[in-house]
Amino acid sequence: MAHSEEVIIEAGHGAKNYWRDLWKNRELLLILSRRDLSVRYKQTVVGAGWAVIRPFATMLVMVFVFDKVAKFKGDEGIPYPLMVLAGITIWNFFSTTFTQISHSILLNSNLVTKTYFPRLIMPLSSVVVGFVDFIISIVLYVLIAIWYKHFPSWQLLLFPAFVLLTLAASLAFGLFFAVMNVRFRDIAQLIPFIVQIGFYACPIAYSSSMVESNQGAWWYDLYYLNPMVSIIDGFKWCLLGDGAFFKVSSLYSTIGFTVAVLGISIYYFRKEENSFVDYI
């Protein structure tokens, strides 16, 4: 005999049982995740290979421009291409996930207008695309690290913590922009600009040790207000070892700031999600 479940719609039901409904709809989360992943590489010749080509090509260009032309130097004892690739890998994870989350509501507008389910499922399903790209990019990093014979030390144990922190930061900012993107379509034009500026504002092509030599400069404190600075530095430290510069004290404020913004963004998303259908 088929199992049936009775659903009673009543005032305030969604708010009271939101997290329970989120868990009940976990199958929808998996379906949307698979769909987002297939759409990402649909009708492409290379497919998931782009997750290797993009970071590798970016690394080559940045090594030529910043190392060969601008004469930037990385941390002592660490191959410059490896330092750059580590930064690109974690930044791409953040930027891809942040961008996917920010556009998730509009990309699923047909579902929003037709049926009820916890809208938080849509941004959560978008995380899969960035994570799969990240895993593939890590394989590329491992191969190049073997080429340079540069292997991680005990810091690698903290690798999952920085991946989770990056994911939390992506959700924290992505959820806020997802709501704003529904109400103000100009946000869709702003998001690529933010990602582009962030790429150069973060220690990807350079080491934060260069910034330390400018303590006292008016922009020094502003630099560390960027939460991705300590996340990227910490990620590099996990992969590259003690030779990579990492200001541990900057991580404390980053964790506190990220957790606070994530809580505010979830609250804001929950408060506004019932009005999505009015703006789509």
Image (cartoon, helix red, strand yellow):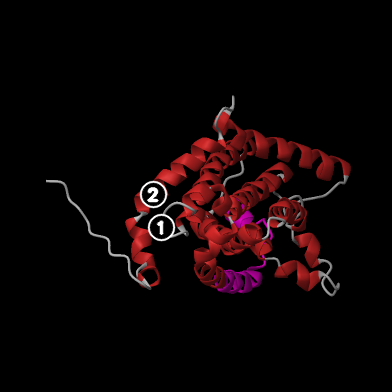
Closer-to-camera residue (118/62): 118
Residue 241 visible: no
Residue 117 visible: yes
127 in magenta: no
Is disc 2 in contact with disc 1, using a CB cutoff of under 8 Å? yes
Q: Disc 2 residue type?
A: Leu
Residue, far left = 1
Callout 1 crowding tier (Cα within 10 Å): few <14, some 14–19, many ≥20: some
**SS of the residue at dot 1?**
loop
Closer-to-camera residue (30/78): 30
243 in magenta: yes
143 is higher (above) or lower (below) than 130: above
Residue occupied by mark 1? 117
**SS of the residue at dot 2?**
helix
User: What is the x, y in percent for residue 12?
Assistant: 38, 73
Q: Locate the C terminus by quadrant.
A: bottom right
Looking at the image, tell me whether mark 2 or mark 1 is earlier in sequence order: 2
Residue occupied by mark 2? 28
Q: Main secondary structure of the magenta part?
A: helix
Magenta-tinted stretch: 234-261
Q: Disc 1 residue type?
A: Phe
